[in-house]
Amino acid sequence: MTKTPLLSVSHLKSYYFSAQGLIRAVDGVSLDLYRGDILGIVGESGSGKSTLALSLLGLLDPPGRIEEGGIQFQGEDLPTLDEAGWQGIRGKKIGMIFQSPEGSFNPISTIGRQISEALQTHRSLSRKEADKEAEMALARVWMPQPEEVFERYPFEISLGMCQRASLALALSLNPSILIADEPTASLDIVSQAEMARLFSELQETLNLSMIVISHDLGLVRTIADRVAVMHAGKIVEEGPAEQVLEAPRHPYTQGLVSSELRLDR
Amino acid sequence: MLAVENLSKTYHTVGAFFGRDQHRVTAVHEVSFVIRPGEAFGLVGESGSGKSTLARLIIGLERPTRGRVFISGTDIGTLTQRALRALRREVQIVFQNPYTALDPLMAIGASIEEPLVNFTSLGKTERQRQVLDLLHDVGLAKRLLHAYPYQLSGGERQRACIAKAIALRPKFLVCDEVVSSLDKSVQVQVLHLLKDLKQQYGLTYLFISHDLAVVNYLCDRVAVMLRGEIVELGGRQEVLFQPAHPYTQALMASTSYFLKDTAYEKGRT
Amino acid sequence: MAVERVLELDMDRVPANPRTEIVTAFFRHRTAMAGLFGLIALIVLSTLGPSVVGHDPTATDILAIYASPSSSHLLGTDQLGRDLLTRLLYGGRVSLLVGLMATLMATVIGCAYGVFSGMAPKWLEYPMMQLLDALHAIPVILLVIVSEVFGESSLIKMVLVIGLASWMGIARMARTECRRLMEADFVKGAIVAGASPTRLVFRHLLPNMFAPLIVVVTVGIGQAILLESTLSFLNLGVPTTVPSWGNLLGNGMSSVLGGAWWTVLFPGIMIVLTVLSMNLVGDGLRDLIDPKNRSIGS
């Protein structure tokens, strides 16, 4: 029984045309995301994973652009969309959180106010309804004392809490897919573990579909159902997480997995 | 080799000219420990724990507010600027960020040569020879002698920094998060290198890292730092695998969390 | 277990000094090259021009006063019959000389003060900066008036006055850059590698400050030339016997009412073109520094 993927990337090529020459950041990537699954994309620096993340949301600025390939989502081929089309997708249908939690927030406005405003704009709620939803969104990401955090400015809360707030913001718009680009890289290990647990939990309770892009094998091992390994712009191996991470077939993946420092080895 | 006694460092941010409302930050508070010669001593802490400040105090880049640092029995606080500079032959440091640790306008050969220029009276040819030896020791090709930092990868730059740090054959090396900015596959290589060099040159390390797996790989004894204080100290085995302090326990639990394939365990695949 | 393999660098060209990269990029920048061309033209004209034109800048010719541009006097003559073109070219020498010398002086003093305060401990740095602010607030005219006490006006005095008026901006920039660099890892690394303060300054700090410094200096030369012209215009600048664009302009002011437009137009154009050229070069350098230097200096 084959399910249709929620998101399907086929032979995607995103290149940078710079003064130094042509950079084939994403060079023929194909992958599928199924509903309710967490797909982990693992790669080291320079593998092209960040460019892939940006391409999926049409956030690739010149001198970069999607050169070839398709991204099928809800019957549309995303690279063909114009800016207005993308704006309909971004946040509302496909949400995103980034490595730097402060990057999602305006430093001079409170967390609660910002989530509320996003809700008022994109889901046409009244101020009161939006405020309430915002607080619920914060509670849903296990934020301690959500009413308190609502009133706080981004710089007043810890990075871990800020990242959770970004997640709350992204999820409050009810996207079908969440893309997380290095969501735990800036956090301390304890916050990382909490965040990983949160992702798994949300996958269960909300049937959330996610693409997690990370250089951290541990994170991907813990939450992903399927894993794709990216190197030099291409996917060198892809499959169920258990198989790719425990019994990798491609030499690059094998090298990656064997060089992981573990406490239990 | 190294002893630290009741070391404290408090920063005052200067307010108004006759600032009465000065803001005080205590980065390091009453830290004491001893590192024996030939030992690899690990210091675990998150950002904000004070570990980098501690590194700078030990290296003499900053003066403590209270307490003393003894290197080979000498209290470095009593040394003059000249004597402190002479101490640099014995104690060296490798920084976290290989992208900012090298002068961008100097070829790496010249950067590695710097300690030799400053402290020895060797001629240019002899210095060049030693730099080439150092490049070999850290696994960099001879061709890179004239390369500029921007042409090298993070791992290569970090190796260059290590070469520079061991140029004077110091006895004590402080490694401040030296692998944290590197890709995981490169981390292992650099750690291998550090282990080899320790063997080859009989070095003593103060190895600072937030990553328990890294500390586990390299260190004999471990101290855990939280908010400027040492909360746990002991042998690697006991601190990591039988932690007494709740903070260490939390660190271990979180690190171990990522070792399990939780998704698979949930039977989703 | 030894390191298994020696890492090779995948280079397809000879390692390039970051400095040469910037220089080649500069030559590709069109407006900067236009500015540079203008400057070179100016230098060539002022040094060689007078001998080509042949007139004596101080030779008066009562029969040819207020002569409009003609074949014998390409740009006309002034109220004493002196050839304007020659005086203009000589004036160019003065402007360039004063501008360059004064800025050189300002740069040396400014850098020294800035680097010193940037490296000094905080308790010394703050009073130094406050002193700098106070000095910067002193109007140039005041300096000129004070300088009158020290004897007759001369080119040297002009260089000194303008130099003393201009070093503060450079000092502030030098101190900011120096402070920023002192926090950089590679400077701390140099200290730990045993670099003496002298070596630190000349080998590490100054070269890495060169980029923003050169921008400030090139624009500063333009400012110095403008300042000299303004002062000379007010007869507070170079001695009135020495032709300078400023005093040509000043002399021309009275003449223009009588219809001798050339006495004002040409000196004015020269000032504008020169300052514009310097600014274009400065802008070009600034453009190069900004995005490109992110990979180098930061």
Image (tube, coloured by chain):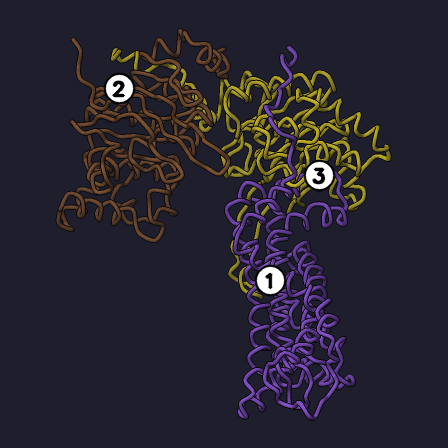
Chain colours: A brown, B yellow, C purple
Point out which mark residue C38 bears. Answer: 1
Q: Earlier in the sequence, mark 1 or mark 3?
A: 1
Q: Which residue is mark 2?
A: A32
Distance (Cα) linking label 1 and label 2:
60 Å
Q: Between residues B139 and B1, which one lies in front from this camera angle? A: B139
Chain bearing mark 2: A
Q: Residue C111, percent across and down?
A: 68, 59
In the rendered view, would you say C155 is above or below B236?
A: below
SS type, badge 1: helix
Q: Which residue is mark 3?
A: C192
Figure quadrant of residue C166? bottom right
| Mark 1 crowdedness (10 Å alpha carbons): few <14, some 14-19, many ≥20 | many
Position of the C terminus of chain C by quadrant: top right
Q: Identity of the amino acid at label 2? A: Asp
Q: Residue at x 31, y 21 (%)?
A: A11
Q: Residue C85, percent across and down?
A: 65, 77
Chain bearing mark 3: C
Q: Do the dots labelled 2 and 3 sit on one chain?
A: no
Position of the N terminus of chain C by quadrant: top right
Distance (Cα) linking label 2 and label 3:
52 Å
Q: Residue B118, percent across and down?
A: 79, 39
Q: How many marks?
A: 3
Q: Residue at x 61, y 85 (%)?
A: C250
Q: Residue at x 30, y 50 (%)?
A: A110
Chain bearing mark 1: C
Q: Residue A138, percent across and down?
A: 25, 39
Q: Do the dots labelled 1 and 2 sit on one chain?
A: no
